[in-house]
Image (cartoon, rainbow, N blue to C red):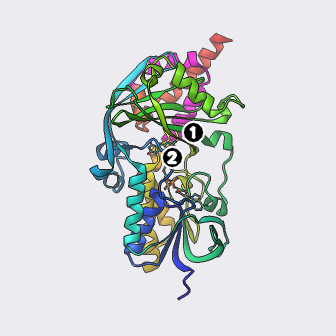
């Protein structure tokens, strides 16, 4: 058999791609997994927060698969947190119970890839996929030159701004609004409550996003933020936002006073909800490549694991029984589609409220725990949309 012909080529070895690759390889299909990185999971572009299975059951009540998939082994867990605090621009905190596992993403991503390789998947590192033809011929750039690979099915697991997604005609309507720019520092010597995740909001703190302090345990923390250019001043750099927060934020600065930056990384987070086409007749998109990140909070690991699992099984059944690839979309929509749509509505509401810090302060105080907690859990208390729109209009009329 031609050594460059595969049943399935998976582009991207993050949690979504390696989960799909592991299932298909175990079923005996010939699978190749490509990643442009030289080392799996490095650099880590993540806050590493994974809600516990019981939280996921609460967030995605119809999901059959995701609660099991997020049940990570303790060897990958560096810390467990039990509360989230949302902090308004003027420092008012709203706190509620929310249990998470903070995971070591580099270690966990490597483990998932290992699962695929143990089942005979062919791993190609330092391999950048630069093109896909309509007949699923992939152009791959490696350190030793370029090569071509052919496969029956391509799984696009190549993260935000996915090349494979573009080859099936998905495009962002507005990049400055739909892709969040983010910067994360791993800091050592952070003086914070290691059981509490902090989320800071405000136009001057992180326009169109939020700042996070996620304790990794052992005085380490992920300190980062996402912002969107559609709502930020055009020329302010991400590093100056970070510096301002670390040194000037009344709540964060004392916690970070003696902390040292251990590593830093920038990345994109897709926040426009699902792409229009999550599959074609020979392509399936999974994880960030499909836009399956919760737009209101940037969380995407659970959906990436879910997509990889579902895609693996649907593609396998497509080969064995002729199951249509459209079945993939049917299942992921049932698992978390509603919550993804709600999270996008929450983001649009937040976009209208958070244009001004005074308005954000008032709204967060008025909303309190009873309204903010459901929003973080991707539930929209029905009157919220109506109330917030009316309130924003009234507030703006008062201020003008
Ligand atoms: C700063 C930041 C913080 C985050 N924090 C959290 C969090 O705390 N909790 C959470 O649930 N989610 C978080 N997310 C989102 C989460 O990281 C993603 O949703 C998740 O990694 C998606 O997994 P994936 O497999 O779809 O894609 P990725 O993990 O992005 O993997 C995609 C892979 O594709 C490879 N690739 C891309 N293009 C090509 C190409 N052309 N050829 C070959 N390889 C390619 C990349 O190298 C990468 O390894 C965060 C994201 C960011 C950026």
Which residue sits at x=51%, y=65%? 326
Mark 1 Cβ and ligand 1 under 8 Å apart = yes
Residues at marks 2 and 1, CA–CA distance in whole angstroms:
9 Å
Mark 2 crowdedness (10 Å alpha carbons): few <14, some 14-19, many ≥20:
some
Q: Which residue is mark 1?
A: 182
- Indicate the quadrant where residue 3 lies: bottom right
**Residue 60 at what x, y percent from top left?**
38, 46
- Indicate the quadrant where residue 19 lies: bottom left
Mark 2 Cβ and ligand 1 under 8 Å apart = yes
Q: Secondary structure at mark 2?
A: loop
Q: Which residues are magenta?
A: 341-370
Residue 48 relative to residue 146: left or right: left
- Indicate the quadrant where residue 116 lies: bottom left
| Residue 255 in view here | yes
| Residue 310 in view here | no
Outermost bottom residue? 1
Whether the residues at callouts 2 and 1 have beta carbons within 8 Å, the answer is yes
Foreground residue, 387 or 19? 19
Q: Secondary structure at mark 1?
A: strand
């Amino acid at each position: 058999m031609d050594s460059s012909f595969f049943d399935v080529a998976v582009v991207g070895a993050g949690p979504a791609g390696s989960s799909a690759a592991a299932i298909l390889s175990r079923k005996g299909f010939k699978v190749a997994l490509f990643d442009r990185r030289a080392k799996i999971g490095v650099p880590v572009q993540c806050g590493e927060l994974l809600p516990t299975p019981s939280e996921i059951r609460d967030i995605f009540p119809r999901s059959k698969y995701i609660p099991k998939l997020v049940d990570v082994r303790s060897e990958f867990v560096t810390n467990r947190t039990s509360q989230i605090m949302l902090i308004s621009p003027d420092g008012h905190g709203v706190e509620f119970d929310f249990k998470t596992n903070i995971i070591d993403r580099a270690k966990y991503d490597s483990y998932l890839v290992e699962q695929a390789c143990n089942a005979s998947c062919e791993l190609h590192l330092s391999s950048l996929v630069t093109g896909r033809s309509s007949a699923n011929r992939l152009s791959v750039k490696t350190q030793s030159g370029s090569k071509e690979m052919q496969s029956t099915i391509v799984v696009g697991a190549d993260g935000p701004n996915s090349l494979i997604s573009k080859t099936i005609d998905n495009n962002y309507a507005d990049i400055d609004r739909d892709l969040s720019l983010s910067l994360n520092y791993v800091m050592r010597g952070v003086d914070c409550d290691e059981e509490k995740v902090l989320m800071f909001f405000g136009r001057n703190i992180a326009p169109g996003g939020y700042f996070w302090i996620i304790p990794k345990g052992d005085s380490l923390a992920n300190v980062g933020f996402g912002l969107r250019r559609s709502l930020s001043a055009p020329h302010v750099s991400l590093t100056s936002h970070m510096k301002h927060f670390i040194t000037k934020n009344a709540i964060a600065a004392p916690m970070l006073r003696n902390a040292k930056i251990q590593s830093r990384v920038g990345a994109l987070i897709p926040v426009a909800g699902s792409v229009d086409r999550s599959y074609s007749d020979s392509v399936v998109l999974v994880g960030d490549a499909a836009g399956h990140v919760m737009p209101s909070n940037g969380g995407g690991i659970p959906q990436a694991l879910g997509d990889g699992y579902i895609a693996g099984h649907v593609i396998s059944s497509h080969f064995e029984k002729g199951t249509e690839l459209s079945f993939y979309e049917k299942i992921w929509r049932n698992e978390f589609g509603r919550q993804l749509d709600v999270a996008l509505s929450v983001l649009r509401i937040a976009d209208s409220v958070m244009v001004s810090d005074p308005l954000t302060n008032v709204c967060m105080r008025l909303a309190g725990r009873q309204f903010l907690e459901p929003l973080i859990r991707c539930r929209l208390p029905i009157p919220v949309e109506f109330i917030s729109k009316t309130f924003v209009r009234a507030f703006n009329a008062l201020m003008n």
